[in-house]
Image (tube, grey):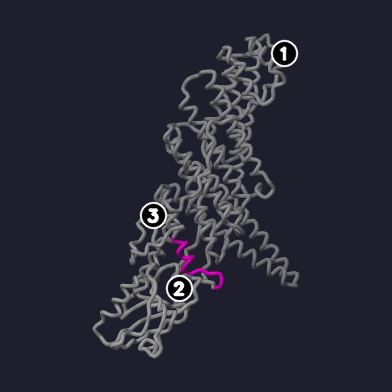
Amino acid sequence: MPVTLPTDSSHSGSIRKGCDPFAQTQRSKLQHRRARINQQINKEMRMRAGAENLFRATTNNKVKETVALELSFVNSNLQLLKEELEELNSNMEVYQTDSDAISVPMIPLGLKETKEVDFTVPIQNFHILNVHYKLTSSYYRHIKLLYVVCQAMRTPSRSQAGLELLMEYYNQLYYLDQRFFSSHRNLGVHFHWYDSLTGVPSSQRALAFEKGSVLFNIGALHTQIGARQDRAATAGIDKAVDAFQRAAGAFNYLKENFSNAPSLDMSALSLSMLVRLMVAQVQECVFERITITTRDTKFTSQLQLAQEAAQVSDVYSLVHQTMTQPLMKDYVPFSWASMVQVKSEHFRALSHYYAAAALCDHTGKEIPRLLFRFYVNIASGQTLSQILQDPEKRRKLGKAHLRRAVMRHEEAMRVHSLCKILRKMDILQDVLCQTHKRSLEKYLELDREDDFDETAEAPEIQAHTQQKPDITPPSFTTVQVSDIFQRLGPLSVFCSRAHWGPPRVIRLQKREGGMGLTLRGDSPVLVAGVVPGGCAEEAGLREGDYIVAVDGQDCKWAKHGEVVLMLTSSSDREVEISVVTL
């Protein structure tokens, strides 16, 4: 967690800003439409709740019929709005790279929308109840700075600066939590967030909900940064891998540390699905890097590509299983589930294609030895060895792999054709058509007129990868922030857990024999003892008082020697001391 910087008594302010909310980029237009639909869904849900309450309360049959008709209209409108929002959430092309290179699109996640939060009045009320420092003009500057950060984090840029902005606000929430939020006192702030996929609004007073939603947006922004990378080169692939691994880390951290989420997108099941999706996209990037760096067509290279493709297919198959579970099936956009299924079939087809290329384009004594670890189930190693030593049998095994490749390609194209959103993605269609054509052409090369025997079934390929994806947890210390309200004093003392008595102003008359008190500690200095009958006791100073100001000068951060100097250096006979007591 961030550390208070006691040496800096003034806050320099945030230098990070959000995107211009009026900028007409494709992404901003998409976010604006999402926000508008979220508000309409919120309105319709309030209308539905009111109508349902009236329906249950009334005994008038005519009123019940009217309310039932109104409910049918409201439910119909809600369904249309949710379908429109699903189409926006399925709009993957907006987040993709502008490169002309043909690559399979990635699945990004839209940001959670939120309502404006203003801490001004709640924090003012907190000070009225628990005053240990005057509400001066500097306080209002600090609260304005907090408001600026709150506003900026709603529209982060799709860059490192946007991530730092969200992390800055997340870290600042730690200080707010320590200073103003406690289990025994409600600050009265409501945090409103919309579900990232359905637009259903949720509201809580717990600051943990605000922190969890911001962390969710950090993960979502990582997915958008990963999707926009140009994966035609290794540099872009490495950036995409890093972004998706960090997204997986944010969602995984959220799943392990935040519970009882009011929205479905932050539930454990949904977050587990998102973690698996990000891991699968990392695995896909690993495969793409190998295809770029492996320019040769050696036998071992083809086998490696086949096993890497099988690994990608397996992880996407696992994601698809998660998406089709009962609670997730009606929640996850149909285009997401379709895209994941298309990728699982597509990469399984590529796996069989590269296996056929290895078998039919190469010969050598090393082939049987390597292939023993290539297949999942082989009945007899001797039988396989005999097949591979016979060119005709090896051709037929390669043909069997190509047959399965063509079938898998056709299944991927079939699933693709069933989804209206995916049909609009020209790049995806180009990739599927090109790879299908390549496998079909190679199959026809191996096919002969005298092949009357039924083509044998190709064995399953053992999935294997040279780089397993990492789940990179969020690093909260990368963005250093200082406490906006550190003028209130050290956080270890002046925090929400402390119960302070009302502030008192002591006018201490100086005498020749001293002030009659003993001081101890630093930041703030504590009155450790009061001499009976001394001037300190007569003025009303008590043991256990904390000195927060001397002659109007704040000294919450002052050291012991500095406070002693302030008390003794005054030329007046009277010293005004402000104290508070736990």
Residue linked to disc 1: 453
Which is nearer the eye, 468 or 15?
Answer: 468
Expressed as whole percent of the image width and height from the top left, the position of residue 552 reads 32, 79
Expressed as whole percent of the image width and height from the top left, the position of residue 386 reads 67, 12
* 55 vs 464: above or below: below
Which badge, 2 or 1, comes first in the chain's sequence?
2
Residue bounds of the magenta highlight: 172-184
Residue 179 forms part of the magenta stretch: yes
Residue linked to disc 3: 20
Please give left or right for residue 21 compared with residue 206 in the image: left
Q: Residue at x 70, y 63 (%)?
A: 68
Which is nearer the eye, 102 or 36?
Answer: 102
Residue 426 in view here: no
Q: Residue at x 39, y 88 (%)?
A: 537
Q: Residue at x 45, y 44 (%)?
A: 225
Expressed as whole percent of the image width and height from the top left, the position of residue 142 reads 37, 67
Residue linked to disc 2: 121
Q: Are marks 1 and 3 in contact (CB under 8 Å)?
A: no
Judging from the image, what secondary structure is the residue with disc 1 in?
loop
- In the image, what residue type sits under mark 3? Asp
